[in-house]
Image: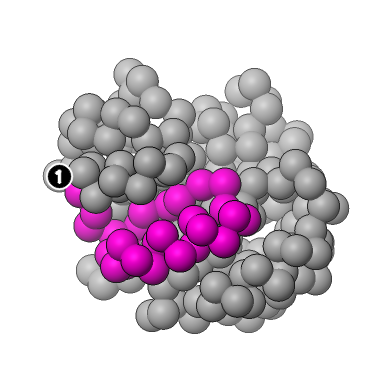
Amino acid sequence: MRTRTKICGITRLEDAKACIYAGCDALGFVFYKESPRYITLDAFKAIVKGLPPFIAKVGLFVNAAPEEIEAAIQSGFLNLLQFHGDETPDFCRQFKFPYIKAVAVSSSVDLLQYVKDFYDSEALLLDSSHEYLKGGTGQTFDWNLIPHSLSKPIILAGGLNAENVKEAIKKVNPYAVDVSGSVEESKGIKNYHKIQAFIKEIQDATV
């Protein structure tokens, strides 16, 4: 099965188009004000209005107020919500909108329980654990902590780059991979050549 690609932290139309033309499947937009890749709802709307069809737009939220999430949904441009904070299952499902739940993986985290708790999620996004950062750490985690028996699609994140993504795919066999920092010129500004190199490694990977 082909491994899908999500590129997160889009802040400019030209970067979004570069990701699409390189072959990515989904774009992530960070609606979290503490992030250097934060984007306003108006800026998000302006970008997606300039995009071609058949590309998934994912809105990332971290412990956001329900009205903020509802406003993004009502824009009509999102395909998927990504909850990257401490959101409970009941919080996530109250919007009656497709969502994925990010999990900061460590040896103390029970991923099988996450699958049960977030049974109605589209997938689990597995990311590196950090004391205060909610994603975007640039660090990998121990992929051996992922059980082989997870009955839900896995989106692998955390420190992936053109040098290690092929190994990650062979080891984890994720449904998709998620990248942000390693394909950037600076925070929030993507680099087309890095994007191309990353996606080429994914396309060349065999499981």
Q: Is residue 70 magenta?
A: yes
User: At x 51% / y 58%, what residue is drawn?
Assistant: 74
Residue 81 horizontal/vertical position (percent): 45, 51
Which residue: 66% across, 64% down? 183
Quarter where residue 203 is shown: top right
Quadrant in the picture for residue 119: top left
Q: Is residue 46 above or below residue 116?
A: below
Percent coordinates x, y for residue 95 in the rendering:
35, 48
Instruction: Decide if residue 91 is on the left or right side of residue 199.
Output: left
**Is 169 covered by the magenta stretch?**
no
Q: Which residue is the site of mark 1? A: 108
Observer-nearest of 153 and 140:
153
Would you identify the image quadrant in which residue 61 lies?
Answer: bottom left
**Residue occupying the far front of the picture:** 74
Task: Identify the image quadrant of the N terminus.
Answer: top right
> Is residue 128 shown left or right of residue 42?
left
Given the image, on which type of amino acid does mark 1 rest? Ser
